[in-house]
Image (cartoon, rainbow, N blue to C red):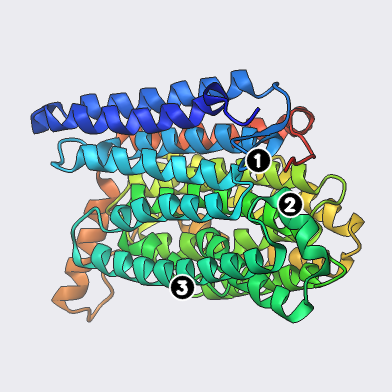
Amino acid sequence: MHKDPLALLPEILLLLGAVVTLLTGSFLPRRRQWAARAAAAAALAVSLTAAAVLAPGEDRTVYAGTYALDGATDAARVIVPAAALAVLALASGRVRGDRRETEFCVLVLLGSLGAVLLAGASDLLLLAVAYLLASIPLYALAGWGRDARGAEAALKLYLLGVLLGITMLLGTAVLYGLGGATDYAALADGLAGAPGAALAVGTVALLAGPLFKAGAVPAHFWVPDAASGATVPAAAFLTTVPKVGALIALYRVLTVLPEQVIDWRMLLAAVAVATMTLGNLAAFAQTDPLRLLGYSTISQAGYVLMTLAVAERVGALRSLLLYLAAYAATNLGAFAVAAALPHLRTLAAYRGLGRRRPWLAAALTVCLLGLVGTPPTAVFMGKLTVFSATWDGGMAWLVVIAAVNTLASLFYYLRWIAPALSIRRPGPPPQGAGPSDGDGEQREATAAAAEPERWAAGTAIAAASATLVLGAGAGWALGLLSDTLVR
C-alpha cells in the first residue's frame, strides 16, 4: 500500500505536538509557559506509546517505497522520543520561566521528528528532506541561550551543516544519475553496473551529510564547540538524538551500494578508526566537563561506525540498535549531572561531590564508566555485540583497535571520576597566592555547595538506573530487535 497515514502515526504525533506546543506558548504569559512544555512532553510520550503499539506490525514500505517501516525504524521511534523526554526533564530548571521556553520545546520536537525520518528514509529525496528537518532546529538550539559562546557554536554548526548538506545533495544527484532512481530498491539494481570512480564520488558526497549529523571524522569539528558553547540541555540533545537517525540512515544507504563496484566497507572502517582515535586523544587534555563529553561523543560514534563496516552481516543491525539505545541513556545521564550542577565548570570543581551529593556522584560514576564500556552497564553489552559482529564480519583488526581505544578512554573518564569521588575537601589557597587566586577558590567552593537542580538531578539518577537495567536485560532487548531492513 502506497498511502497509509496511520502507519506514520508516531511521526504525525510529533509534528502535531510541535504545532500544539507552539500555539499553546503563543497565547500564554511567560509565567505559564510550563503548559507548553507539558504539551511537548505529552506529545513525545504519546508518540512513544504509538511506536510501541505499532512495532509488532508487518515490515513494509509506504508512500511509493520512500519510507521504510521495519525494525530499525521502530527502534528509532522509541529511542528518539525517550531521549527527547529526558532532555525536556533535565532542561526544566534551565528553561523554566524563560521567554523562549516554548521555542526550546518546539525545536526539540522538530529535531526529534527529523531524526526519526532520517532513520526511516528509503529514498534519496526523503533523506535530503529529513536531513534539513533534523538540522535546522539544531542551529537554533545551539544558539538558544543568546550568549557569545552559544552564538559561536550555532555559527560553526550552521556553516558546516550547510556545506555538508550541499555536498550530500551533490552526492544524491550523482547517484540518481548513475542509478536512474531515488528509491533504494530501484537504486540498488541501477547501481550494480555503475562506473566505479563516479560511484565513489557520489557515495563519499552522500555520506557527508549523515556523518556530520553523527559527529564523525572528518565532519566532527562542531561537536566540542556545541557541547561547551550551547546550554547544557541543548548540548545533550545535539550530541545524542541526531546520532540515532544519522547512523541508521547511514546503515540503510550502505546496504544499497554494490560491494563489487566500490569497497565501501574499508572506507567506513577507516572512518571508524579515525573517529574513535581522534575523539579519545583530543579528550585527554580537556578540563571542561562539557568539552570532554563533546569529544567523548565523537569517540562513541567511532565505535558505532564499526557496525556499518560490516553492514548486512548477521547481528550487525541489532548490535547497532542496542548500542544506540545504550549510548542515548548513558550520554544523557552524564549531561544531566552537568545540568544539575551548572556552576561546576572544571573537572577539579567536582572534588568532594561524593561527600556532598552521593547520589549524583554515583550517577556520574555509572554513566562515565558506562561510556567506557564497563559491565554491567548497557554500553558494555552494546560494545560486546558490536565487537562480536565486527569480528564475525572478518574485521578482527578493527576490533583490536577499538579495544585499545576503549582502554585509553578510561584515562580521561577517570580524570572526572577521581575528583568527584575524592573525600578531600578543597584546601585553602596556597601561600603567596594573589587575590584573584583566592577569589577563584572561594567561587569554586561556593559553586560546589550550591543546591543541584532537582529535575536534572532526578534525570541523571533515572538515566544511570536505565543504563544498568538495560545492561542487565540486554539479552531480552536484543530479542525484541530486528536484524532485517526493507526497501
Q: Is residue 216 visible?
A: no
- Residue 51 in the image, given as x and y percentages of width and height: 57, 25
Q: Secondary structure at mark 2?
A: helix
Question: How many numbered circles are shown?
Answer: 3
Displayed quadrant of residue 425: bottom left
- Which numbered disc, 3 or 2, marks the residue that appears first in the sequence? 2
Name which residue type carries label 3.
Answer: Phe
**In the figure, residue 278 lies in which quadrant?**
bottom right
Distance in Å between CA atoms under marks 3 and 2:
35 Å
Report the mark closest to the observer, 3 or 2.
Answer: 2
Q: In the structure shown, which secondary structural element does the residue marked by tag 3 occupy?
A: loop
Question: Disc 3 vs disc 1: Cβ atoms closer than 8 Å?
Answer: no
* Crowd band around label 2 with a 10 angstrom C-alpha radius: few (<14), some (14–19), many (20+): some
Which of discs 3 and 1 lies nearer the camera? The answer is: 1
Determine whether, in the image, residue 268 is placed left or right of residue 301.
Answer: right
Tag 1 residue: 65
| Residue 269, placed above or below residue 420 | below
Residue type, mark 1 in image: Gly
Query: Do labels 2 and 1 touch, CB within 8 Å?
Result: yes
For marks 2 and 1 on the same chain, the one whose residue lies earlier in the sequence: 1
Q: Which residue position is annotated with label 3? A: 221
